[in-house]
Amino acid sequence: MTTQYTEDHEWIRVEGDIATVGITQHAQDALGDVVFVDLPEVGKTYAQKEVAGVVESVKAAADVYMPVSGEVVEVNRALADEPSLANSDPMGAGWFFKVRLSEPAQVAALMDEAAYTAFAGA
């Protein structure tokens, strides 16, 4: 299971036709302490690059974009109670939502870790 990345600092891990999505370490570093996460509605379908949620920190608010087209099948309800999970474990327990891929080929166009690291300047 590999992790791909977007230019908007989301990560995506695909298992079968379901992808888990969250924000990257770089994104949470830039945001600072996350205080609120607005997650998408389960059952709603989004196009690639459409705004699917919002993450708010003490410094700023940022849109969370859909890295691939598909239907939201699950959201991380733990983030509602503990938004700081997006800071403490952005690549694990701080995941945002899961989406059923409608166009799996879109994943191949995303960046791998080396390309994202170079892009983000990390």
Image (cartoon, rainbow, N blue to C red):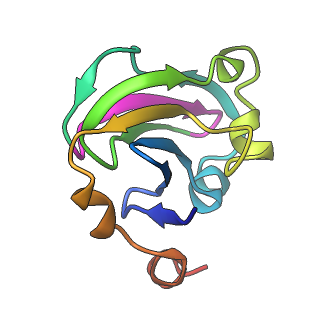
| Towards the viewer: 100 or 33 | 100
Q: From the viewer's perspective, tell me whether residue 114 is left or right of residue 25.
A: left
Q: Nearer the viewer, residue 87 or 113?
A: 113
Is residue 53 a member of the stretch shown in magenta? yes
| Whether residue 22 is visible | yes
Residue at the image point whose x is 29% and y is 18% from the top: 44
What's drawn in magenta, residue-wise? 48-59
Residue 70 in the image: state x and y as whole percent. Answer: 27, 35
List x then y, in percent, for residue 54.
45, 29
Residue lying farthest to the front in this orientation: 16
Q: Tell me where residue 79 sits by quadrant.
A: top right
Q: Is residue 47 above or below residue 35?
A: below
Query: Of 79 and 31, which appears nearest the observer?
Result: 79
On the image, the x and y values in percent for residue 68 come to 29, 47
**Image quarter of the N terminus:** bottom right
Tell me the residue at 45%/63% (across/down): 5
Residue at left offset 51%, top offset 31%: 97
Q: Residue, x 56% and y 25% (percent of image)?
A: 37
